[in-house]
Amino acid sequence: MAKIELDAFYPYPVEHVWEALVRPEALEQWLMKNEGFEPVVGKKFLFKAKPVYGWKGVAYCEVLKVEKPRLLCWSQRGEEDEELPFIITWTLTPEGKGTRLSLVHDGLVGLRGLMVKQFMGAGWKRMFQGRIPMVLDYAQQKGWDKLPKDRRLLPGDCHAPA
C-alpha cells in the first residue's frame, strides 16, 4: 500500500494553522468547495471540484478524529459506496515560533493507488507550497472573516507565494 507524506513549516502559531484546516471557507480557498464540513467526529461532508478523468468531482468524506488544535483526520471516497477510503491525517506540531504541518494520505492501494499517489501527491505539494501559505498570510493580514466568498485568493491579495 502506498501513501503520500508531506510536511511544511509555517511561521504562524498552531491555532492559526488549525483555522486553515477547520474553517469551511478557508478549506475552499486552498483545497476544494465543501458542503457540511465541521471538525466533529462522525460528521459527513462533501468536497466538490471539477470532474476529471476517472473521478466525478465529488469526494464523500467523514471526520474520523479531532484533537484541537493538533490532529484532524477524515476518510475520503471517490464514490459513495467505495469500500476502501483514503484516510487523510493532518498533524500540527508547534516548532519554534511557528508550526510544522504534516499530512499523511493513506489507503492508496494497487495500481490505482500508485496513479492516485502520482496525481494527488503533486496536488498536495502545490497546496503546501502555495495555496496554504497564501491563505495563512491573507488571514493573518486581514482576518479569517475577510476571505473572499466569490473567488479564490490570488497572489496579489497577500505576500505569500502562489
Image: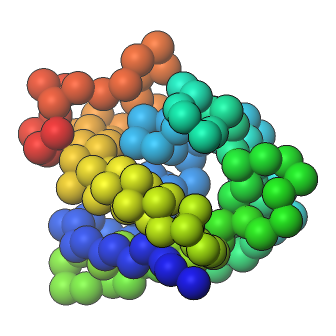
Q: Is residue 153 left or right of residue 16?
A: left
> Going by the picture, which residue comes out furthest to the front?
111
- Residue sitting at 49 percent across and 78 percent down? 3
Is residue 54 among the parts visible in the rendering? yes
> Is the C terminus in the top left, top right, bottom left or bottom right quadrant?
top left
Q: Residue at x 48, y 20 (%)?
A: 149
Find residue 58 and report its image quarter.
top right
User: Picture quarter containing residue 100?
Assistant: bottom left
The answer to whether 161 is drawn above or below residue 121 in the figure is above
Q: Which is nearer the eye, 118 or 93?
A: 118
Q: Is residue 83 above or below residue 131?
A: below
Q: How many marks?
A: 0
Residue 77, horizontal then vertical, whole percent: 73, 55
From the top left corner, tell me how far across and down residue 74 is, in percent: 68, 66
Quarter of the image holding residue 106? bottom right
Q: Is residue 44 left or right of residue 144?
A: right
The reply, left or right, for residue 136 in relation to residue 129 is right
Question: Left of 16 or right of it: where is 70?
Answer: right
Viewer can see residue 37:
no
Q: Is residue 14 above or below residue 137?
A: below
Residue at horizontal 43%, vertical 73%? Answer: 4
Percent coordinates x, y for residue 158 in the rendering: 16, 34
Q: How is the image coloured?
A: rainbow
Quarter placement of the N terminus: bottom right
